[in-house]
Image: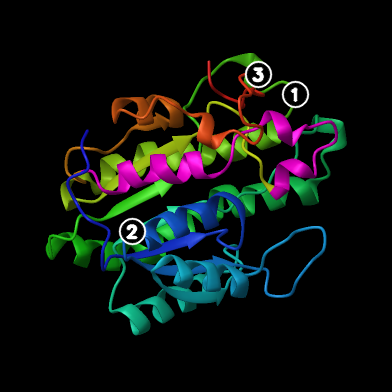
């Protein structure tokens, strides 16, 4: 897989884009001259969750891209449709969708209220499906115009092993639901020339969501930029030949000659990273 297409002038919709992995992917694409449509719920500063849609848009434009920030709860079909309309109105179409928004609760069954269950399924599975569905007409237009459209889901490889389920059944099902979208939509959209892939980290990534989990030492994590660089290689690959894949960040980077990963360590020189979930 080689980087054969530029992101310059492409319009990319990213969910969960106000911070963390979504913002890192947006900034990486901005450096290539892309147009970024940033979707998230946070518009007011929160001391516990640094970053808002407005601060993200400022970063993206400073990095060299054009930014459109749209406050969006991806569980709301009308809000998603309005965001797509705003993107088309501003930039003329959509070439790439990154389904990054996700909710997490690493809790066993008795400690997972149904409200939390519904949140994870509403954001992870339904939100991914809804955003893909809403963007599809524009992605089809992008394919017909030869603009190399992609959908990228930030979700893990599917591994039907008990140990990936038993500690957090609801969360695993919700993340695997995103991956099932990858599998199904890759097959459905292949004749249309639209790529659908997944990307997942081998090690834990330092994000605000991870910081909320008791006992996690962010010093033993990698920076979100490792996923941003990996995503770049996926999104610049040929959509007709690179689809239905479940990429792991370090493996993908190695395929492109990036083997020194120290730049991504939260603690320079650290080699003892926390492994992420779902990677056998």
Q: Which mark is residue 140?
A: none
Which region of the structure is painted magenta? 208-237
Q: Provide the secondary structure element on which disc 2 rests.
A: strand
Q: Which mark is residue 272?
A: 3
- Marks 3 and 1, how far apart in space? 23 Å
Query: How far across and down, in percent of the image, does residue 45 sit?
Result: 75, 71
Q: Residue furthest bottom?
A: 89
* Residue highlighted by disc 2: 96
Residue occupying the point 58% across, 40% down = 223
Residue occupying the point 52% across, 51% down = 100
- The tag earlier along the polypeptide, 1 or 2, is 2
* Residue highlighted by disc 1: 167
| Dot 2 alpha-carbon crowd within 10 angstroms: few under 14, some 14 to 19, many 20 or more | many
Query: How far across and down, in percent of the image, does residue 123 sit?
Result: 61, 54
- The tag earlier along the polypeptide, 3 or 2, is 2
In the rendered view, tell whether residue 272 sits above or below residue 15: above
Q: Provide the secondary structure element on which disc 1 rests.
A: loop
Nearer the observer, disc 3 or disc 1?
A: 3
């Amino acid at each position: 897989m080689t980087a054969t297409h530029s992101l310059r002038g492409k319009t990319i919709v990213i969910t969960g884009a106000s911070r963390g992995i979504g913002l890192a992917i947006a900034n990486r694409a901005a450096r290539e001259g892309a147009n970024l449509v940033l979707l998230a719920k946070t518009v007011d500063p929160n001391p516990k969750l640094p970053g808002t849609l407005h601060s993200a848009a400022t970063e993206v434009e400073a990095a060299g891209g054009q930014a459109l920030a749209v406050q969006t709860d991806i569980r709301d079909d009308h809000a998603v449709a309005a965001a797509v309309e705003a993107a088309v109105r501003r930039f003329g179409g959509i070439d790439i969708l990154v389904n990054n928004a996700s909710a997490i609760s690493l809790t066993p069954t008795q400690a997972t209220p149904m409200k939390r269950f519904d949140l994870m399924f509403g954001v992870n599975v339904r939100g991914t499906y809804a955003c893909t569905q809403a963007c599809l007409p524009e992605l089809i237009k992008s394919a017909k115009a030869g603009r190399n459209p992609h959908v990228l889901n930030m979700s893990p490889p599917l591994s039907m092993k008990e140990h990936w389920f038993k500690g957090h059944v609801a969360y695993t099902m919700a993340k695997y639901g995103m991956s099932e979208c990858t599998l199904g939509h890759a097959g459905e959209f292949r004749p249309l020339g639209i790529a659908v892939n997944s990307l997942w980290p081998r090690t834990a990534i330092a994000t605000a969501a991870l910081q909320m989990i008791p006992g996690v030492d962010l010093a033993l994590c990698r920076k979100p930029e490792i996923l941003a660089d990996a995503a770049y290689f996926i999104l610049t690959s040929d959509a007709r030949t690179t689809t239905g894949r479940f990429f792991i960040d370090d493996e993908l980077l190695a395929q492109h000659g990036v083997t020194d990963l120290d730049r991504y360590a939260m603690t320079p020189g650290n080699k003892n990273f926390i492994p992420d979930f779902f990677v056998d």
